[in-house]
Image (spheres, grey):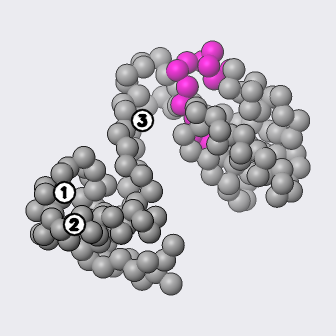
């Protein structure tokens, strides 16, 4: 996806990243454009895949005993088919919030959210222990979230898309 983003697109995306629940009228007003232009542009950004989805972020405090774990995974066999199989398995698991294939260290880094340690242990058994292709698992448990800002800065100084 390499669609060019002009200043209006960038302004709309910044506003939507702050609050995607605002009405089209409020979005247009905040962006300084007409409602019809805002609607057309947002639809184009969705159709082009620039906006992947809109969702509500639920506070982890809703379940105070929940755990966030950052987990490094090293596979035993490194072939593309083994990596794809591992990705498919973890991506199908609801507790896996994020999955990154990484270089220069482990093969994958996962961000997990589970309602408690018992659920974490069951997840480890399901995803990592029963699979003979997982060589190493290293888990880090979050004690406190000090920043969570899932946004992309789209300043006008960003380089143009190739």
Query: Is residue 114 highlighted in magenta?
Result: yes
Where residue 152 appears, as percent x and y from the top left, is 39, 61
Magenta region? 110-121
Q: Which residue is mark 2?
A: 38
Q: Horizontal placement of 150 versus 119: left or right? A: left
Nearer to me, 123 or 117: 123
Q: Which one is earlier in the sequence, the residue at label 2 or at label 3?
A: 2
User: Which residue is denoted by mark 3 in the rendering?
Assistant: 145
Could you tell which of marks 3 and 1 lies nearer the N-terminus?
1
Mark 3 residue crowding within 10 angstroms, few (<14) / some (14–19) / many (20+): few
Image position, residue 20 (x, y; %): 28, 50
Residue 61 vertical placement versus 18 (above, below)? above
Say which element carries label 1: helix
35 and 90: which is toward the camera: 35
Per the rendering, the mark at residue 24 is: 1
Tell me which numbered mark, 2 or 1, is placed earlier along the sequence: 1
The residues tagged by marks 2 and 3 sit, at their Cα atoms, a distance apart of 34 Å
Evaluate whether residue 70 shows in this view.
no
């Amino acid at each position: 996806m390499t669609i060019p983003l002009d200043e209006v697109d960038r302004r709309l995306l910044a506003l939507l990243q702050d609050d995607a629940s605002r009405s089209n009228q409020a979005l247009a007003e905040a962006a300084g454009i007409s409602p019809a232009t805002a609607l057309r542009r947002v639809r184009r950004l969705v159709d082009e895949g620039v906006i992947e989805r809109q969702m509500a972020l639920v506070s982890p405090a809703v379940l105070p005993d929940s755990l966030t774990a950052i987990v490094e995974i090293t596979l035993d066999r490194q072939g593309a088919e083994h990596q794809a199989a591992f990705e498919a398995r973890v991506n199908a698991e609801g507790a896996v919030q994020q999955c990154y294939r990484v270089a220069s260290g482990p093969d994958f880094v996962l961000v997990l959210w589970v309602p408690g340690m018992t659920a974490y242990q069951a997840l480890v058994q399901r995803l990592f222990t029963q699979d003979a292709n997982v060589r190493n698992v290293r888990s880090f448990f979050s004690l406190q979230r000090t920043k969570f800002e899932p946004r992309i800065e789209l300043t006008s100084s960003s380089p143009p898309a190739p």
